[in-house]
């Protein structure tokens, strides 16, 4: 690795010394500098675009050129005649002053080459072909090469440090704007332009009165040959491994016309390459945004999905995935747009994980525990959405959406514990939810705007849990507490749960535009919900009869029949003032809260009023540079499961007992954001600092019997604090792009174990430098190095883990026929209990396409070339340190054939 880094630096130095710079300033005929003028340099020998630049607010530009080379320089600006001249570079840098004159004919500027990057107001436009080198296959491959655009570790698109909220294709939502599904499936050869829409307003009528600076969207403009025709690709392949036969089939078909579009994505494979994983499907919300999102109230309805053991980067011992997804949009008239999608995903996953956990406080008397777990997961998820938008005129817009989600999931776990022995666990859940959204926007006149938003959620969850403990000895104390019959061959424990949620979230907004610099907003809203929670624990005996146990703790309560009602009626006011570079938005909301829960014949209620202030100040230092400060106070309310008094088994070793008297937590949040995107020197900077302090936070009193934990909830009088910061600096030097990501997280919270309070402090920091190239003809590489530290302090005891992870990616387009891709990563983690743990992952592929116009491509792909058997992970939390070994699929090679439509 060190040799590779050295070679890279030497190559960078050599290329740097072989280049000269052309600096200059562009002015108009009266000597005023021109901002955002386009400057390009075309190599006269190859007739290729060699370098490009955009002038800053002082009219300055800079280009990087080769020595001893002839260029054609073109400078253009809207409304001005294009300036052209020939330039011969030598060994010295060059400076120029260029004057542009008005074009009286106002003819459209014509350039020999399109600018790779242009700015049109709040829209940043990338010409995709300017960044392609022939190795790209998916939209994701193109986006990675665009300045200011990143694909994060979760596969989501980020621009200037902010996650992109929506992606469209020719102005039409792609699967309701899901960015990951788009980036991994839209073929790169269909992409003409990538338009980054900053300050994107979902509703045009509200663009002048709502704050959209954190709202980013991307619109993909298709090439002309891809419109009014089916395009896409069909890929199929197979191979063999030491475990099983391998297969993959992925049809991806798209059709776009002015009035309608159709998209279909299919996936059938057992290679660990799913189009959507379980986490993606859980987060696939269909674009719904709660109307109360900015009200200051946070109501958690809970998550009663199964506690699936997560895959590591889609890796496991065995992964089978099936996906069928369709998306449509149709405009029967100019005033009506219809769209929708349907997704069905079925997956089977086999996992194995070995872990060792050591508790950090010897006074707790909790034994160390080694576990070996085999898990079989099955998940079937169906999603369907229908949307309609009616715009009879510019002053009226009516939107309706309905999203239905149906899931069936099961999990079988075979666990050996050095403390508890053998345990067989089974879980299943078949939840469904129906979410409806109705929005109406009305502009009365130039100064008065109204908006009504309402959302209704109906949700039903029914998780079932079963655990059979073969070794009774170490579980006997817990079994005795639960009232189980000890005269059985093992303990067969079961629990049924049912959670029904019904929530209405609605608000009415009114804006009065006072003048060009200010407006005032009034909001009248309501958030009303009802949750019903039922549970019962039972033991199956050896003769298959059922025993309803009576616990000898928690007042003998092992069932739940809880009804929880919550309401928040609020009135909000916000004033926006623009003064020069500053934008001030102070606000306040008045809330009338009422919540009650009814269980075991008793009713617990809490009604109160609260005033929640918020404030935002933004400084627009330049057109593409801003600093934003925000403050907000938030009321956080829990879900019904934390209120229920009866025993809840999250697992055999995690018991939960709720508290009907729980109150809300109050959180103060302060956020500071800085953004800068400079096309003069191609520097992109993003930084954020976030601080929160929570009082009356819901915490748990934890008691241990051996490794079995019981949690009882209460409101802590002690404040918890957290501070996080993130920064990214990215700079382009000719064909090289360097970046540095850094993050720091600090949290201080109070924990209560065995009746004792202690303060836990956690420090996490991570640094990732990266170098990436973007040559049109030569091979390209990407080198990064991640260094992270995880430090936990509790009661004078400190545990610390350090991770070092270099990574290399390489791609080459050879003889305009072969595409070679490879990536290698090496991860080492410190281990306080022994030597550092390491693992390596190396993948590679070689593709053949006869020429650029050929529809057929043949690919030989090798995964896990080093045949790594497992990944390792070390970590710590408030009570323990742990290390785990996660087993993955072995080395295998597949042959794939793709056909381009």
Image (cartoon, rainbow, N blue to C red):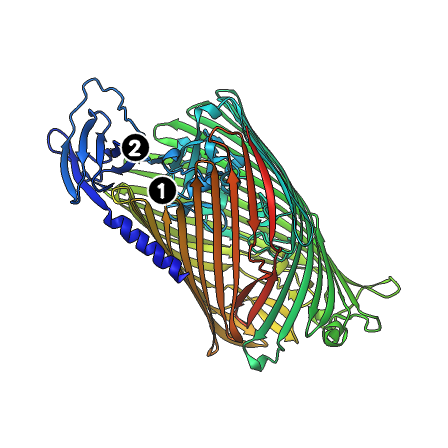
Above or below 886: residue 455: above
Callout 2: few (<14), some (14-19), or many (20+) C-alpha neighbours within 10 Å?
few
Residue 7 in the image: state x and y as whole percent: 35, 56
Q: Nearer the viewer, residue 296 or 387?
A: 387
Q: Do the numbered discs 2 and 1 sit on residues whose CB atoms are within 8 Å?
A: no
Q: Quadrant of the C terminus?
A: top right
CA separation in Å, label 2 and label 1? 15 Å
Residue farthest top in this picture: 105
Residue 91 in the image: state x and y as whole percent: 17, 45
Residue farthest front in this picture: 815
Q: Quadrant of residue 479?
A: bottom right
Which residue is rendered at x = 72% and y = 73% of the image?
478
| Residue 728 shows in this picture | no
Q: Secondary structure at mark 1?
A: loop
Q: Quadrant of the N terminus?
A: bottom left
Residue farthest bottom in this picture: 363
Q: Secondary structure at mark 2?
A: loop
Which residue is rendered at x = 41% and y = 41% of the image?
215
Task: Left or right? Give the position of 47 relative to 351.
Answer: left
Above or below 409: residue 476: below
| Residue 530 shows in this picture | yes
Residue 344 in the image: state x and y as whole percent: 65, 39
Q: Quadrant of residue 572?
A: top left
Which residue is rendered at x = 45% and y = 26% of the image?
396
Task: Left or right? Give the position of 402 relative to 771.
Answer: right
The mark closer to the camera, 2 or 1, is 2
Mark 2 / mark 1, whichever is N-terminal: 2
> Where is mark 1, residue-wise?
775
Residue farthest left in this picture: 30
Task: Left or right? Give the position of 770 relative to 249.
Answer: left
Which circle marks residue 46 in the picture? 2
């Amino acid at each position: 690795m060190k040799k590779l880094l050295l070679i890279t630096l030497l190559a960078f130095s050599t290329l740097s010394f072989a280049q000269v710079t052309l600096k200059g300033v562009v002015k108009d005929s009266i000597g005023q500098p021109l901002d955002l003028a386009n400057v390009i340099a075309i190599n006269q020998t190859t007739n290729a675009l060699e370098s490009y630049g955009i002038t800053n607010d002082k009219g300055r530009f800079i280009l990087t050129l080769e020595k001893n080379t002839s260029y054609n320089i073109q400078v253009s600006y809207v409304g001005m005649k294009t300036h052209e001249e020939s330039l011969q570079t030598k060994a010295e840098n060059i400076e120029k002053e260029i004057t542009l004159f008005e074009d009286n004919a106002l003819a459209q500027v014509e350039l020999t080459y399109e600018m790779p990057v242009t700015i049109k107001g709040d829209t940043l436009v990338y010409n995709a072909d300017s960044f392609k080198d022939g190795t790209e296959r998916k939209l994701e491959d193109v986006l990675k090469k665009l300045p200011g655009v990143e694909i994060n570790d979760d596969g989501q698109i980020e621009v200037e440090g902010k996650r992109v909220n929506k992606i469209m294709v020719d102005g039409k939502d792609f699967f309701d704007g899901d960015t990951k599904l788009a980036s991994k499936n839209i073929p790169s050869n269909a992409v003409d332009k990538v338009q980054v829409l900053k300050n994107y307003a979902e509703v045009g009528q509200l663009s002048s009165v709502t704050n959209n600076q954190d709202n980013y969207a991307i619109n993909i403009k298709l090439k002309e040959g891809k419109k009014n025709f089916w395009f896409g690709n069909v890929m199929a392949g197979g191979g063999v491994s030491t475990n099983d036969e391998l297969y993959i089939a992925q049809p991806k078909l798209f059709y776009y016309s002015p009035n309608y579009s159709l998209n279909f994505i299919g996936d059938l494979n057992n290679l660990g390459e799913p189009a959507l994983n379980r986490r993606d499907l859980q987060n696939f919300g269909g674009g719904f945004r709660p109307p109360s999102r900015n009200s200051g109230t946070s109501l958690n309805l809970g998550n009663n999905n199964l506690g699936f053991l997560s895959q590591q980067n889609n890796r496991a011992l065995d992964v089978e995935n099936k996906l069928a997804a369709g998306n449509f949009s149709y405009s029967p008239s100019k005033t009506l747009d219809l769209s929708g999608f349907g997704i069905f995903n079925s997956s089977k996953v086999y996992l194995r994980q070995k872990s060792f956990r050591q508790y950090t406080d010897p006074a707790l008397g909790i034994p160390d525990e080694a576990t070996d777990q085999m898990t079989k997961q099955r998940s079937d998820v169906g999603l369907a959405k229908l949307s309609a938008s009616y715009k009879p005129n510019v002053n009226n817009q009516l939107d309706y959406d309905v999203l239905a989600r149906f899931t069936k999931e099961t999990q079988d776990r075979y666990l050996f514990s050095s403390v508890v022995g053998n345990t067989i666990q089974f879980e299943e859940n078949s939840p469904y939810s129906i979410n409806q959204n109705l929005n109406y926007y009305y502009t009365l006149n130039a100064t008065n705007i109204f908006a009504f938003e309402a959302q209704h959620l109906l949700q039903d969850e029914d998780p079932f849990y079963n655990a059979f403990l073969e070794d009774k000895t170490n579980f006997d104390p817990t079994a005795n507490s639960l009232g189980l019959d000890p005269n059985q061959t093992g303990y067969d424990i079961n629990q049924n749960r049912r959670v029904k949620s019904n929530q209405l979230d609605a608000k009415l907004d009114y804006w009065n535009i006072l003048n060009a610099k200010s407006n005032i907003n009034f909001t009248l809203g309501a958030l009303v919900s009802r949750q019903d929670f039922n549970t019962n624990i039972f033991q199956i005996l050896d003769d298959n009869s059922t025993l309803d146990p009576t616990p000898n703790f928690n007042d003998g309560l092992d069932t739940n029949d809880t009804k929880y009602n919550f309401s928040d009626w609020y009135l909000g006011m916000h004033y926006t003032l623009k003064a020069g570079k500053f934008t001030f938005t102070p606000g306040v909301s008045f809330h009338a809260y009422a919540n009650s829960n009814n269980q075991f014949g008793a009713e617990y209620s809490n009604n109160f009023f609260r005033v929640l202030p918020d404030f935002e100040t933004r400084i627009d230092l330049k057109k593409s540079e801003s600093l934003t400060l925000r403050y907000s106070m938030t009321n956080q309310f829990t879900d019904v499961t934390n209120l229920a008094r009866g025993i809840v088994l999250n697992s055999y070793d995690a018991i939960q007992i709720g508290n009907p008297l729980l109150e809300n937590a109050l959180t103060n949040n302060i956020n500071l954001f800085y953004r800068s995107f400079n096309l003069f020197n191609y520097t992109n900077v993003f930084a954020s600092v976030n601080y929160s302090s929570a009082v009356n936070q819901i915490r748990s009193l934890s008691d241990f019997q051996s490794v079995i934990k019981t949690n009882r909830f209460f409101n802590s009088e002690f404040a918890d604090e957290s501070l996080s910061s993130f920064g990214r600096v990215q700079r382009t030097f000719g064909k090289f792009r360097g970046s540095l990501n850094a993050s720091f997280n600090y949290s201080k919270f109070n924990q209560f174990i065995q009746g004792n309070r202690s303060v836990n402090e956690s420090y996490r920091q991570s640094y990732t430098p990266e170098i990436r190239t973007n040559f049109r003809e030569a091979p390209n590489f990407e080198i990064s190095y991640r260094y992270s530290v995880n430090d936990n302090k509790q009661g004078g005891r400190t545990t610390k883990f350090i991770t070092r992870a270099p990574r290399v990616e390489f791609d080459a387009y050879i003889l305009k026929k072969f595409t070679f891709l490879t990536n290698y990563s090496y991860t080492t983690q410190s281990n306080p209990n022994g030597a550092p743990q390491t693992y390596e992952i190396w993948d590679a592929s070689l593709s053949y396409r006869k020429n650029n116009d050929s529809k057929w491509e043949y690919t030989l792909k090798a995964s896990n070339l080093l045949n790594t058997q497992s990944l390792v992970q070390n970590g710590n939390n408030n009570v323990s340190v742990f290390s785990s070994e996660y087993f993955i699929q072995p080395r295998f090679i597949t042959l794939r054939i793709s056909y381009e439509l």
